[in-house]
């Protein structure tokens, strides 16, 4: 790992080019040894050569003396002393000889030659001169030669110098040769491998090192290339995995952006239209829950296969994750054909599938966005299609929603609002309004429902139906709940001080809060802070929140009830309307959805339903609340059917607390049923 | 005119070519044509005198002697000899001297051309002698040789020295008579013969030692040098030198000079002998510095003409031997007067060579002694004065 780090560091790279350092180390290790060995060897050779030269010189001079003795013998014996001298003179050409002399048998020097003054070490050799002819053999005299080793010394010195120079040159040549060969045999292959590694690092592909030799570096390079090949395969697989969904084998979200770039680049003309279908399976969670995850996976594979089958070769299918698919048709003639194509996809998806011997009919919603290939914001296509999909899912699941200006406007408004949520909290733009719950028998106000409103500085008053999903999506549910809880507790305080201590306040709990075990503790703490009884609080929940998290919800509800708070089931009749829920959860109230109230008393069926609910509630000991009462006959009908409480414009529209208090003040007067002159908000949201 | 000359020339040539080997005999008492290729240099005393005695004899014996001088160059000598052999008008006889064995090619060419040859002073030696054999066998035209007995001369010279030394009691402290020999060279037959004479004489005299046999290339100066060296050495050795034997007169004179230089008196403290009968030697004898000079062998020139005259007249010397060896003689203070003028003036015409011709029936038997010579001499003009 460290090595890799080193290599990435360019400064260290240049400093430690591997070939150079290896070569330097090699040269550093070998050259001094080489030099020393060379110098020692040449010195040794020269020393032995010196001694051998000395011996040779001795022998040569001795030979000279002997040969001269032979030559001189006759002229000496025959007393041709001039010849003796000239023979002696001849040897003086030998520059090692300093002097020579010939003595006759009486010991007198017959001839004497001195070449040069002997200032150096001088050695002398003397040989007898024997003369013989057929008759006699006598010693005619003696020859003596004095000679100097100076030339040997000088020769040895100059040769030593020469050897030194040659040794140095040889060392230099060796260094150069080592450098060159090391660069060829070590530096180049290392550089080739390094370059392969660098290139591989740069663009993530495995490049082979280009080395042909069969030596160790060739073997190393082959091993490296084999490793590169393995790495390359792994990288390719990794790349494929990174770009594809392992379950369906379709390209994944990562591939999408790349594909969009490719699309704009490869488009025939900038004006050709690209159809982008964002597909989301409806209720895929239900399938997972019902049939298990394996079946869910199988289901997704089925869907992917169908999409593949349904498209043309030029089309592109991807799975973005979960139950989201994307189909892109790179060229459509107009928006209508794009829409037809999207519907075609829906039809293909909607073919029944057998899961665990059960026929399942898949359903999906499609958000369709069509854009020109030259659109500079082509990369926003997924987001734009998502806007359409959002619309489809929220407004008409199982259909195709085409992105248009209105949808974009809605999207922008939603986005703006979502972005404004933190400011909304910080600047207290959220307001809690209250709507009264009236005892249908006594016409007395027994409770208030806290309803949230957003007074946006630019967009004005915004209903909860629009912004609550945004609150939930942005994770601000808990904050808003506490905001409302605090406001409700303050309201209870004011009610008490206004002489209405028995009026209770109902708060809507979003599903996510039911899973929050700290809610009960916080509720108690808040009640304590405002010195109000928790029993004055009612918590309204929807069936949906119960279904998603039965155990946790039940636990939270029990805790809240232990504090004295009551639990009301909101919007009953519209959702699952499970009778089991009524039995299983600790409920105190059931609020009948206004959808059943609005047609009463005209609709006999609604009256029947309400009647059944009322009798069921009565049997289970649950208090019934009718929502959305707008007319007196509706209130009368409810009362007759045994519904205990009523809520609606007939009594009072939701108002800020001050207005409610004033209204209650007036209610204290005998004339009742005066409608509050609060601003109307239609439709009424009872989230 | 030219026609007549041509006819004469043609007749002459035909006569010369067709004349058989023995034809000369028929030309009894006819004038002989003799060519001598002289190996020496002009001015070289011995060879000049050889040629002069040859010519003097020719004049007495009706022979024309043509002398060609080689100037001591053996190549020149060969060219001259071969040139003579190749002549259209070939001589009757060609006299050569086999110095350095250089005469052999000429001898062979002469054989091929049918020219009769005589070797003078130096005959065939060594391989040549073995290869070509004696005269008139392989080489039919090689009639023979005439040489001097130099070994006897050498011995005679040594004995004269020894006798004087013994008489004067010039023994050294070791009781022996110490002599120095100064030879001309070690290779030429004439030198070897003289030296051998010295050795022979000394070998016969147990009281005599030749301290050194030195060689001085026949020259006076070298002889002087080596003699000086010897004398100096002898002094150091405590030797009393009794005599110097010199191979020729110049060397004897060189020795005399060295002796004088060494502070000795030649003739009184030490004796010197020489060979050649040279004028300077005769002067030295007269002055008492030289004991004797042996020689007279320059007379070989004259004697060779006597032989050829006899041969041409039908008295072939080969009847005795094809090798004619002439004894030399010593000139001492006693006989100096008789031959002094002959040598000094080279008055060889005083010699009556006809008196030396072989007697009838005794072909090849000659008396060339100094006494015969002296008695043959014509009276000296004005000798009475």
Image: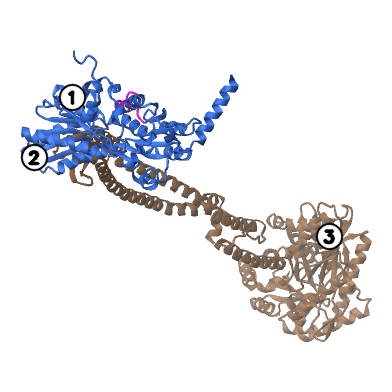
Task: Return the mark for residue B176.
Answer: 2
Residue A14 visible in the shown view: yes
Which residue is the extreme one toward the front? B360
The quadrant of the image that shows the N terminus of chain A is: bottom right
Q: Nearer the viewer, residue B384 or B236?
A: B384
User: Does dot 2 land on a helix, a strand or a loop?
Assistant: loop
Q: Look at the image and give the colour of chain A.
A: brown
Subunit that carries the residue with mark 1: B
User: Magenta part of the protein: which range?
Assistant: B39-49
- Please identify, in this view, whether the residue under mark 2 or under mark 3 is nearer the observer: 2
Q: Is residue B209 above or below residue A567?
A: above
Which chain, by letter, is blue? B
The quadrant of the image that shows the C terminus of chain A is: bottom right
Left or right: where A397 falls relative to B121: right
Q: Nearer the viewer, residue B150 or A211?
A: B150
Residue drawn at the location 11% of the way across and 40% of the way down: B208
Residue drawn at the location 38% of the way across and 51% of the way down: A38
Residue indicated by mark 3: A677
Q: How is the image coloured?
A: by chain
Tags 2 and 1 on a common chain:
yes
Left or right: where A270 falls relative to A535: right
Per the model, the C-alpha gap separating discs 2 and 1 is 31 Å
Residue indicated by mark 1: B336
């Amino acid at each position: 790992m460290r090595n890799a780090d080193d290599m990435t560091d360019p400064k260290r790279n240049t400093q430690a080019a591997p070939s150079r350092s290896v070569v330097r180390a090699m040269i550093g290790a070998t050259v001094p040894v080489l030099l020393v060995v060379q110098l020692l060897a040449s010195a040794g050779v020269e020393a032995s050569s010196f001694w051998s030269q000395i011996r040779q010189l001795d022998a040569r001079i001795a030979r000279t003396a002997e040969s001269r003795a032979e030559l001189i013998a006759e002229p000496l014996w025959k007393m041709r002393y001039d010849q003796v001298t000239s023979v002696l003179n001849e040897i003086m050409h030998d520059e090692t000889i300093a002097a020579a002399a010939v003595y006759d048998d009486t010991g007198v020097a017959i001839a004497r030659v001195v070449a040069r003054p002997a200032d150096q070490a001088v050695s002398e050799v003397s040989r007898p001169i024997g003369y013989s002819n057929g008759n006699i053999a006598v010693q005619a005299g003696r020859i003596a030669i004095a000679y100097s080793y100076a030339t040997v010394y000088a020769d040895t010195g100059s040769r030593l110098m020469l050897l030194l120079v040659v040794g140095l040159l040889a060392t230099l040549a060796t260094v150069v040769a080592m450098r060159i060969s090391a660069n060829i045999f070590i530096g180049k292959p290392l550089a080739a491998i390094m370059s392969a590694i660098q290139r591989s690092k740069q663009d993530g592909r495995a490049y082979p090192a280009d080395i042909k030799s069969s030596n160790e570096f060739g073997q190393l390079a082959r091993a490296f290339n084999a490793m590169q090949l393995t790495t390359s395969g792994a990288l390719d697989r990794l790349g494929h995995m990174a770009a594809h969904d392992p379950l369906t084998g379709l390209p994944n979200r990562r591939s999408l952006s790349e594909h969009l770039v490719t699309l704009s680049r490869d488009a025939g003309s900038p004006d050709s239209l690209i159809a982008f279908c964002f597909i989301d399976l409806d209720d895929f969670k239900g399938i997972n829950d019902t049939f298990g995850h394996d079946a869910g996976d199988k289901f997704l594979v089925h869907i992917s296969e169908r999409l593949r089958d349904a498209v043309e070769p030029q089309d592109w299918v991807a799975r973005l994750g979960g139950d989201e698919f994307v189909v892109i048709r790179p060229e459509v003639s107009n928006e209508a054909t794009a829409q037809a194509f999207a519907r075609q996809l829906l039809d293909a998806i909607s073919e029944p599938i057998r899961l665990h011997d059960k026929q399942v009919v898949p359903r999906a919603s499609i958000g369709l966005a069509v854009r020109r290939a030259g659109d500079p914001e082509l990369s926003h296509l997924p987001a734009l299609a998502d806007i359409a999909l959002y619309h489809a899912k929220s407004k008409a699941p199982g259909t195709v929603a085409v992105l248009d200006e209105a949808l974009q406007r809605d999207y922008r408004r939603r986005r703006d609002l979502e972005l404004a949520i933190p400011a909304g909290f910080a600047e207290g733009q959220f307001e809690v309004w209250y709507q009264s719950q009236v005892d249908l028998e006594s016409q007395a106000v027994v409770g208030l429902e806290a309803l949230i409103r957003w007074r946006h500085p630019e967009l004005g008053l915004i209903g909860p139906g629009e912004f609550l999903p945004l609150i939930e999506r942005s994770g601000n549910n808990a904050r808003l709940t506490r905001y409302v809880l605090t406001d409700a507790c303050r309201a209870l305080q004011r009610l008490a001080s206004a002489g209405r201590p028995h009026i209770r306040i109902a708060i809507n709990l979003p599903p996510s809060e039911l899973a929050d075990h700290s809610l009960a503790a916080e509720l108690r703490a808040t009640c304590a802070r405002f010195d109000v009884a928790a029993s004055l609080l009612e918590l309204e929940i929807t069936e949906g929140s119960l279904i998603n998290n039965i155990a946790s919800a039940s636990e939270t509800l029990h805790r809240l009830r232990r504090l004295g708070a009551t639990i009301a089931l909101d919007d009953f009749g519209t959702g699952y309307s499970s009778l089991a829920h009524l039995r299983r959860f600790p409920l105190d109230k059931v609020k009948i959805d206004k959808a059943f109230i609005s047609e009463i008393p005209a609709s006999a069926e609604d009256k029947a339903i309400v009647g059944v609910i009322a009798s069921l509630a009565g049997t289970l000991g649950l208090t019934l609340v009718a929502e959305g009462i707008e007319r007196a006959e509706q209130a009368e009908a409810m009362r007759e059917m045994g519904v205990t409480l009523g809520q609606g414009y007939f009594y009072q529209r939701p108002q800020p607390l001050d207005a409610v208090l004033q209204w209650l003040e007036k209610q204290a007067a005998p004339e009742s049923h005066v409608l509050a002159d609060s601003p109307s908000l239609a439709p009424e949201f009872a989230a | 005119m030219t026609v007549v000359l041509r006819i004469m020339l043609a007749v002459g040539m035909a006569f010369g070519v067709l004349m058989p080997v023995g034809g000369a005999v028929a030309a009894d008492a006819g004038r002989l044509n003799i060519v001598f290729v002289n190996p020496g240099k002009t001015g070289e005393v011995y060879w000049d005198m050889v040629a002069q005695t040859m010519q003097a004899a020719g004049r007495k014996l009706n022979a024309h002697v043509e002398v060609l001088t080689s100037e001591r160059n053996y190549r020149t000598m060969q060219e001259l000899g071969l040139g003579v052999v190749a002549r259209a008008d070939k001589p009757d006889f060609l006299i050569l001297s086999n110095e350095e064995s250089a005469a052999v090619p000429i001898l062979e060419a002469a054989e091929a051309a049918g020219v009769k040859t005589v070797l003078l002073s130096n005959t065939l030696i060594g391989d040549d002698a073995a290869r070509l054999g004696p005269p008139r066998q392989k080489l039919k035209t090689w009639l023979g040789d005439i040489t001097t007995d130099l070994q006897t001369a050498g011995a005679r010279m040594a004995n004269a020295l020894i006798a004087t030394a013994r008489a004067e009691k010039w023994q050294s402290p070791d009781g022996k008579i110490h002599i120095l020999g100064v030879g001309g060279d070690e290779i030429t037959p004439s030198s070897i013969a003289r030296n051998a004479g010295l050795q022979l004489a000394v070998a016969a005299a147990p009281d005599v030692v030749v301290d050194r046999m030195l060689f001085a290339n026949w020259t006076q100066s070298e002889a002087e040098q080596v003699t000086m060296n010897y004398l100096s050495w002898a002094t150091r050795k405590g030797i009393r030198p009794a005599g110097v034997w010199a191979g020729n007169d110049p060397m004897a004179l060189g020795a005399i000079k060295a002796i004088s230089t060494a502070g000795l008196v030649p003739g009184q403290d030490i004796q010197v002998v020489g060979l050649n009968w040279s004028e300077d030697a005769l002067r030295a004898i007269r002055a008492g510095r030289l004991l004797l000079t042996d020689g007279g062998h320059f007379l070989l020139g004259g004697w060779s003409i006597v032989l050829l005259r006899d041969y041409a007249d039908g008295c072939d010397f080969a009847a005795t031997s094809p090798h004619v060896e002439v004894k030399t003689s010593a000139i001492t203070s006693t006989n100096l007067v008789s031959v002094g003028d002959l040598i000094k003036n080279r008055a060889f015409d005083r010699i009556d060579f006809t008196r030396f011709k072989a007697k009838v029936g005794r072909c090849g038997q000659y008396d060339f002694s100094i006494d015969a010579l002296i008695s043959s001499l014509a009276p000296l003009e004005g000798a009475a004065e």
